[in-house]
Image: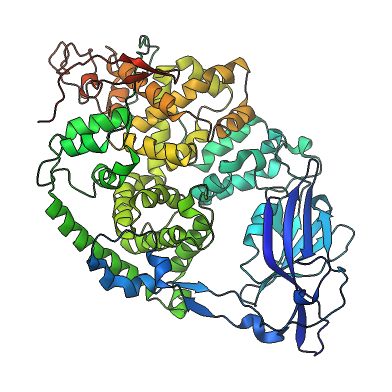
Amino acid sequence: VVYEQEGVFIHSLCGKNYDQDSLISGVLRVIEKENEVIVDWRPLDDTLGNSNILCAGKDSSSVVEWTQIPKEKCSQGADRPSSYEAEWDMVTTVSFKKKPHSNGDAATHANGESKWSFLFSLADLKSIRQNKKGMGWSYLVFCLKDDVQLPALHFHHGDSKLLIECLEKHVVLNESPQDKQILLVNSQNKSLSQSFENLFDEPSYGLLQKLKKDPYTVTMGRFSKVTNYIFDSFRLSDPSSQRRPPSEMADFLNDAIPGLKINQQEEPGFEVITRIDLGKQPEVSRREPVSAEEWAKNMDSEGRILNVDYIKRLIFKGGLCHTLRKEAWKFLLGYFPWNSTKEERANLQKRKTDEYFRMKLQWKSVSEEQEKRNSRLRDYRSLIEKDVNRTDRTNKFYEGEDNPGLILLHDILMTYCMYDFDLGYVQGMSDLLSPVLYVMENEVDAFWCFVSYMDQMHQNFEEQMQGMKTQLIQLSTLLRLLDSGFCSYLESQDSGYLYFCFRWLLIRFKREFSFQDILRLWEVMWTDLPCQNFHLLLCCAILESEKQQIMDKHYGFNEILKHINELSMKIDVEYILCKAEAISMQMMNCKELPQAVSEILGIESSSATPDSDTGEDENGAVLSCPTSSYQSISTPVIAANGTRDSTQQMSEMQSLAPA
């Protein structure tokens, strides 16, 4: 069962009075079988008992009722540090939610046959008729290829969007040119196992136009499930005769993001990177997470961090134990200054609480009529609600439809639109917020940490995508230095643009690792060690790990895209951190590091390797982040193959006791 929705009614028009419908409550399911997909609706009680038939007036669907969410729901999961926030309880609780219409408590009687049940194969579906927006309950009418029209299904509890999205994973739906309320089915079953050759159907160009218009929605909504996607386009009866060659499709993908094309020889100031011997990757190790005791020992009586560099190095090498994250992340993200006292941080939180709730009140006080006249706010809310409903529910903090975590997620994102109305909300931002909110367990702290994170990430979400273009070009530069042969192979398969890394970069690997692993990965990256753009070296580490399989099996354009996508949730975070650190050491020890690479990694001079722990090279130039500055913590080894050896210890390269 890939979709299930209760509260889907058939209006049978068999009520006693002319102005009443008899409402038959049922469950709608979409079921994947080995060779087909089935749509199945049946009454809640297969015998169609008395309780399944309800009567409602014809105009009842136009009634909209609103109710306040109880205080305990809004405050649950929010850790209030002081009574100060209680002054804002009124704002917090003015959170409205549409109330499902019950149609009354009375039930009428009918004969008990289950004559309304139906099911059909998706392969037999011809079209779907939708209701006009704003015209009562959302409903759908399925029309089959033999022109059989099934009873209209009315969605009393929610709308039909999730069902349409589910069906679009298996068939392509497009608006009829004659009637926008009708969705035409333009293909046969698109099962999860369908061939990747369908990527190159002629009308796939339509997706590329969507990619140009809204790359984030397409990337997050489509590339996230490449195996059951493939391009949102009309599929003709004989696609093989209409298929474009992979090389041409690769050009289309490049054209979809203007300026992305990686032809650096035409770029001003381009430095030709010839094959350079980087030497063998060193074996690196990881330590245990920073404990509460280690954290406390590095703090003075007023709450100042004594040795910031030391703490950052500890976090880089091992991450944080979970109990420390709520406090330490505020420093790592820049919400709390590293040199602040406890009193200064308490005063800061008080000011930020005021500021947050004033912004929250702005959108909370917008009436429904006002919102109708504010298309941007309306669009932001719609996108946010859609993304929040798709939040990863594997974490208990976000389980359930009315979970307080989901409510807070929505409210924080809406408030961010008030904070930065120009940027507003772009799909993918909820992925960056959900782990932060989970760790903070507090609405205000989560918001300001998210603001700090977005200060780092905002270029990823800007309309011109300049940040994404720059990162993809920089990644190509690093990968070419690391393994020019692999780069050449990717280019020969029309994959040299590395567009399959788009989602990795956009939301910092959020959908590639498990929820707990992403907490570890992010806190390591936030230390800004061992160099600038460490996330690009993480990309290199993942790609290098998959190089052998890609090349040995002669993967082409289709297979590379599919293979990279299917790595999601299968990557060992500790192994990749070790490998990325080893790559950074390789590059920083290179005597002939190209200037372009030095600039990407933030290394001031790369003409020679450092000859001492001070990070000075033979000419006296200083590396901005010498390897000795972070690789100096005694720790059990986690080797590059991901295995841990508790007996082997790293050498002490310098004393790192707190000042």
How far across and down, in percent of the image, does residue 600 sit?
Answer: 31, 29
**Which residue does the image show at 14% across and 34% down from the upper left?**
307
Look at the image and tell me whether residue 24 can be seen. Answer: yes
In this rendering, the answer to whether 618 lies above or below 638 is: above
Q: How is the image coloured?
A: rainbow
Q: Nearer the viewer, residue 33 or 453?
A: 33
**Which residue does the image show at 48% across and 40% down from the upper left?**
503
How far across and down, in percent of the image, does residue 126 sit?
Answer: 81, 57
**Which residue does the image show at 16% across and 13% down from the upper left?**
612
In this rendering, the answer to whether 633 lies above or below 389 is: above
How far across and down, in percent of the image, does residue 78 sit?
Answer: 35, 60
Dividing the picture into quadrants, the one containing residue 101 is bottom right
Q: Nearer the viewer, residue 103 or 279?
A: 103
Look at the image and tell me whether residue 272 can be seen. Answer: no
How far across and down, in percent of the image, does residue 617 sit?
Answer: 17, 14
* Quarter of the figure with the C terminus: top left
Dividing the picture into quadrants, the one containing residue 63 is bottom right
Residue 478 relative to residue 341: left or right? right
Q: Nearer the viewer, residue 270 or 469?
A: 469
How many numbered discs? Answer: 0
Dividing the picture into quadrants, the one containing residue 6 is bottom right
Residue 149 relative to residue 503: left or right? right
Name, please, the residue furthest toward the right: 146
